[in-house]
């Protein structure tokens, strides 16, 4: 079983351009998810946003529930610092511990010179990666396109930085239906299939679909992944933080 960044997607929302970053990266916002495998609630995942030293910090943590650590151990943490003026990542700190898999690396982005410095803490190696002016990592991309129309996103090919390499991402829109969420009842959502070549967020050895709400503050409400060892389901449990929109009023 490999959860990897599939779990990480959970706390995310699809959406905004740099001109609308203030409604995409909301300091104080926290989204909590439950991760189940074959119907067993194995892990939780939380994504939070805050502001520090003039930057936006997105932090995502995923851990196995104590009762199920004997089945599969998950202890992951990702932290990305974002420039609120450009909605571009400044640095990315990534640590993954899942079963026997261990990853730990740090990236510093230099958009002016179109390069990123990738430091692998485990292999003790450093590489310089060529990037484009608007290259983003997964977390920054998902938040930075939060308010952009889904059809516009589906009509484009997006460039993502993943673990020291550059990949292309496409999105395919499917059906729309109401999904039941524990704290919010039935929420109208659109099903999206990500198309990419890299492992982790979008599995190469299986199928993954995620459901995105239609509210102005768009949230990923559910993720369904079919992998060789069964099915993984990730469902939004609660959203907290500032504001008076649908998510906060429903707390």
Image (spheres, rainbow, N blue to C red):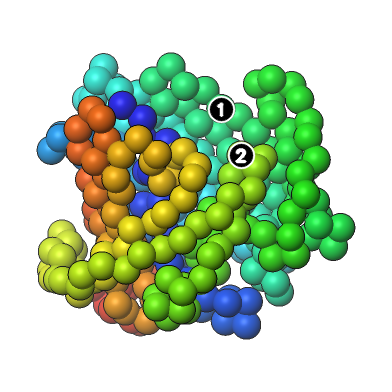
Instruction: Name the residue beneath numbered marker 1.
Output: 103
| Residue closest to the far right | 113
Indicate which disc residue 163 carries: 2
Indicate which disc residue 94 carries: none
Q: Position of residue 5 (x, y in %)?
A: 44, 42
Q: CA distance from mark 1 to mark 2?
A: 10 Å
Q: In the rendered structure, which disc, 1 or 2, sits on the residue that comes first in sequence?
A: 1
196 shown above or below 184: above
Q: Are marks 1 and 2 in contact (CB under 8 Å)?
A: yes
Q: Position of residue 185 (x, y in %)?
A: 13, 69
Assess disc 2: are there few (<14), some (14-19) or many (≥20) residues with their C-alpha within 10 Å of its C-alpha: some
Q: Position of residue 47 (x, y in %)?
A: 44, 53
Dividing the image into 4 quarters, which one contains the N terminus?
A: top left
Given residues 110 and 25, the one toward you in this image is: 110
What residue lies at 30% left-to-right and 23% top-to-bottom? 72
33 left or right, relative to 137: left
Specify the quadrant of the image occupied by residue 25. bottom right
What residue lies at 52% left-to-right and 75% top-to-bottom? 16
Assess disc 1: are there few (<14), some (14-19) or many (≥20) residues with their C-alpha within 10 Å of its C-alpha: some
What residue lies at 36% left-to-right and 52% top-to-bottom? 10
Disc 1, SS: strand
Disc 2, SS: loop
The answer to whether one can see residue 54 in this image is yes
Given residues 228 and 99, the one toward you in this image is: 228
What residue lies at 64% left-to-right and 48% top-to-bottom? 166
Name the front one of labels 1 and 2: 2
Total numbered badges shown on the rendered structure: 2
Specify the quadrant of the image occupied by residue 53. bottom right
Given residues 164 and 66, the one toward you in this image is: 164
């Amino acid at each position: 079983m490999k959860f990897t960044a599939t779990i990480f997607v959970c706390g995310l929302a699809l959406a905004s351009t740099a001109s609308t970053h203030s409604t995409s990266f909301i300091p104080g916002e926290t989204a909590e998810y439950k991760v189940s495998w074959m119907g067993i609630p194995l892990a939780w995942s939380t994504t939070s946003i805050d502001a520090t030293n003039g930057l936006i910090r997105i932090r995502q943590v995923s851990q196995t529930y104590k009762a199920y650590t004997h089945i599969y151990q998950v202890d992951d943490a990702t932290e990305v610092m974002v420039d609120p003026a450009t909605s571009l990542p400044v640095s990315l700190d990534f640590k993954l511990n899942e079963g026997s898999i261990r990853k730990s690396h740090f990236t510093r982005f230099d958009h002016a010179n179109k390069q990123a410095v990738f430091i692998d803490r485990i292999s003790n190696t450093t590489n310089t990666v060529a990037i484009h002016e608007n290259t983003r990592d997964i977390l920054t991309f998902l938040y930075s396109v939060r308010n952009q129309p889904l059809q516009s996103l589906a009509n484009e090919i997006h460039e993502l930085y993943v673990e020291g390499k550059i990949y292309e991402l496409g999105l395919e829109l499917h059906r729309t239906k109401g999904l039941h969420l524990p704290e919010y009842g039935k929420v109208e959502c659109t099903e999206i299939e990500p198309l990419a070549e890299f492992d982790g967020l979008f599995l190469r050895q299986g199928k993954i679909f995620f459901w995105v709400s239609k509210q102005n503050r768009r949230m990923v409400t559910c993720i369904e992944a079919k992998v060789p060892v069964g099915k993984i389901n990730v469902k939004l449990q609660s959203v907290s933080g500032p504001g008076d929109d649908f998510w906060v009023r429903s707390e």
